[in-house]
Image (tube, rainbow, N blue to C red):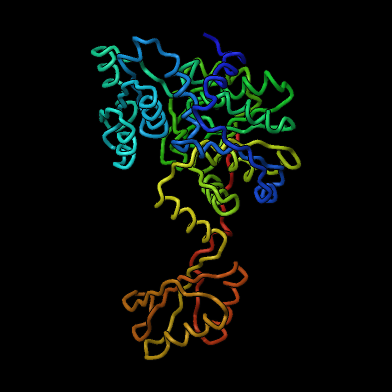
Amino acid sequence: MTVTIEDIREAARLLEGQVIRTPLLEAPRLSELTGATVFVKCENQQFTNSFKDRGAFVKLASLSPDEKKKGVIAISAGNHAQAVAYHARRLQVPATIVMPETTPFTKVAQTKAHGARIIQSGETLADCQEACEAVIAEEGLTLVHPYDDDRIIAGQGTIALEMLADCPELDVIIAPIGGGGLIAGNAIAAKETHPGIEVIGVETVQYPSMYHAVRGEPGVCGGQTLADGIAVKNVTDRTVAICRSRLDSIHLVAESHIEQAVNAYLTLQKTCAEGAGAIGLALLMSKPDAFRGRRVGLILTGGNIDSRVLASIMFRELERQNQIVNVRVEIMDRPGVLGHVATIIGHCGANILEVVHRRMFLDVPAKGAGLEFMIETRDFAHATEIVDRLNEAGYTVELLDAPGGRESPSVLG
């Protein structure tokens, strides 16, 4: 089966009343940030907080009565697992999800809460393949692949149909690429209905599998990434062929820009994006000149991000913007000096978040001490003002870290 625009339109009809028709929201603050006119398709508002609901429902609805009776199986540690489990329960289809043994307990619990049987095997998704094949051979279950399936691709392609129905003037649609099912379906839908539109895919630097596959090159993938939802090492002939024929370009984005995009969605758009969901905005932020003045539709694919990771990202971004800085002050170790330094910082209008009093460092005089302050400031100029005031009071001061002056360069394909 080759996916056609009619397949995607049929998928859209199947999805009416079954998933949320998510809003396409104009994003003035993101537009101001990037220079483009930005519209955000909020797939994080689906029931399982990800676009995966679409393809999962379309695939499950297409099963024969016998296939539905026997049940389905999927390999996933994330959004696909929850989508398959949720819609299988709604359609009264038994679902088995094979997950790595290393899957966080919360993800296992969330998937199990939708009624799925969970099998945990191996440390990675690749390790799960053998267990999955064994269950299929023994029980005759139908595999619901996360991207190498025409019905999955058709279901995901309904996103672009909705975007272009709401805003036919879009110049560009930008979507993440993991295995390629999302971008493949949406590229077909966009190009068939609006031939002049540009469709761009984005991958993280650590996992450039599709970027190299469409060029016929071997790709080296691996490492930690915030965009774990698209950390796919192996893409398939089906999605590679569609991407090669339908996409205008594929770009690679560095981790620092993904972090900044997650933070921008939260602080400027007031919505939650996981790393993979924010990677389209990361491209805009890292390459603004390429999109300035253009109407850009971003697919915010999901919002399932660990709360601790999100807190860390927000804190790191404050450091990047020099709104949290660390300074070290060398003092004489005698009563009242700590209070005097703190008073100077307070008079400068800064807030002390943390202070460490160190006496045992060898680079501190025997009769001295080192104070390390974590300070909340307005910006780098404010931090510099504090350092100057402390210097004027006779203290030796070092600004320990100024990330805003050492931003990592973007890596683009």
Outermost residue, left side: 138
> Going 49% across and 29% down the picture, which residue do you hit?
178
Q: Where is residue 174 shown, x and y percent of the image? A: 62, 33
> Going 43% across and 28% down the picture, which residue do you hit?
233
> Going 51% across and 44% down the picture, which residue do you hit?
273
Task: Depth check: give the residue in front, 45 or 214.
Answer: 45
Quarter of the image for residue 170 reads top right
Task: Depth check: give the residue in front, 119 or 284.
Answer: 119
Q: Where is residue 140 shown, x and y percent of the image? A: 29, 12
Q: Does 315 sit above or below residue 325?
A: above
Q: Where is residue 112 shown, x and y percent of the image? A: 30, 34
> Going 29% across and 20% down the picture, which residue do you hit?
132
Whether residue 241 is visible, yes or no, is yes
Whether residue 215 is visible, yes or no, is no
Numbered label tally: 0
Outermost residue, bottom side: 335
Q: Does 111 sit above or below residue 286?
A: above
Task: Depth check: give the residue in front, 242 or 296.
Answer: 296
Q: Is residue 384 left or right of residue 56?
A: right
Q: Does 332 sit above or below residue 107?
A: below
Q: Where is residue 173 shown, x and y percent of the image? A: 65, 32
Q: Is residue 234 left or right of residue 193?
A: left
Task: Depth check: give the residue in front, 384 or 278.
Answer: 278
Split into 4 quadrants, where in the image is the C terminus? Answer: top right
